[in-house]
Amino acid sequence: MENNITFQDFNISQKTLQAIQDMGFEEPTPIQVSTIPVILEGRDVTGQAQTGTGKTAAFGVPAIEQVDVGNRETQVLVLSPTRELAIQTAEEFARLAKHHRGLNILPIYGGQPIERQFRGLRRGAQVVVGTPGRVLDHLDRGTLSFAAVKMVVLDEADQMLDMGFREDIEKILDETPGDRQTILFSATLPGPILEISKRFQKNPEVISVARREVTVPQIEQLYLEVRSRNKLEILCRLLDMYDPELSLVFSNTKRGVDDLTAHLQARGYFAEGSTET
């Protein structure tokens, strides 16, 4: 069944719509169709969706719409299991918020000089994306305040629990305002995830979207004419949309292969480069 819903059908600002267009998004994915309107209404969501379904924008778009840029306090907190995912998520938020002047996104994670994070928090970051351990560290130090937090997102919640972050997550949620909106995304919904949902969410809307499974009897060929500076963005969008088990990406130079491999790895994709002829 064809999806006729567009991003213009959502109650989102022209600034966000322009950013979505700049990113090359033409139509929302199923998880975005199901989730964005519900989050915009202020409801809690438990989403069962895997990487590659467009879930970051599914919570990123409504999160950005809620931010008051006139207030420099942290208003949205996204918890990620790894530094790589935290960086990738913060980058996508930055792209979605590019036309919202004064909206600052800060990734915080271990392995980075903490003084740099201190400076970013002092300047003001309305959106903080971080790993549970480092977020809790800043909370304990008094360098991060949850007083103005409106929304908390638990991204890849099952992975965070597998890595032993449950206690940290619960401590963080206990410290956030009771009237916050809580969004939970997980590839699976085992008992411990449902326990967290029951304790910290208020009558959540449960949304489940499976990976797209496509079987093609023959190879379909198509091409896109894009500006050079947009190539990486559009490639990542295609990878997220089609979620292939294996892809071959060609470049006409060795340096191009090396650069592309590094960029994809930095965004959390499993990529290997080969320049053998």
Image (cartoon, rainbow, N blue to C red):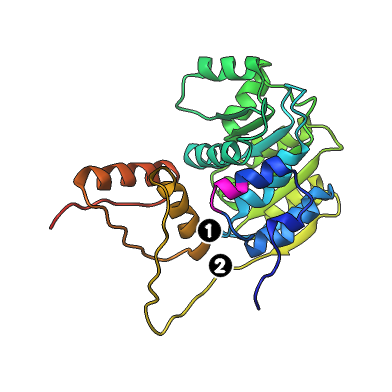
Query: Residue flagged by tag 1: what amino acid is it?
Result: Gly
- Residue reaching furthest to the bottom: 217
Choose between 213 and 241: the one closer to the eye.
Answer: 241
Q: Could you tell me which secondary element the residue under label 1 belongs to?
A: loop
Q: Main secondary structure of the magenta part?
A: helix
In the image, is residue 22 part of the stretch drawn in magenta?
Answer: yes
- Residue reaching furthest to the left: 277
Q: Could you tell me residue 236's position as x and y percent?
A: 46, 52
Q: Could you tell me residue 118's position as x and y percent?
A: 58, 16
How far apart, in angstroms, are the residues tagged by discs 2 and 1?
8 Å
In the image, is residue 43 part of the stretch drawn in magenta?
Answer: no
Sequence order check, earlier mark of 2 and 1: 1
Q: Could you tell me which secondary element the residue under label 2 belongs to?
A: loop
Query: Residue flagged by tag 2: what amino acid is it?
Result: Arg
Q: Which residue lies at the image location 23% right of the left edge and 42% below the top edge?
A: 255
Q: Could you tell me residue 124's position as x and y percent?
A: 67, 20
Task: Identify the residue under disc 1.
Answer: 52
Task: Identify the residue under disc 2.
Answer: 211
Q: Please provide the residue range marked out in magenta.
A: 20-24
Quick one: label 1, few (<14), some, or many (20+) residues within 10 Å? some
Left or right: residue 58 versus residue 227 is: right
Q: Is residue 189 visible?
A: no
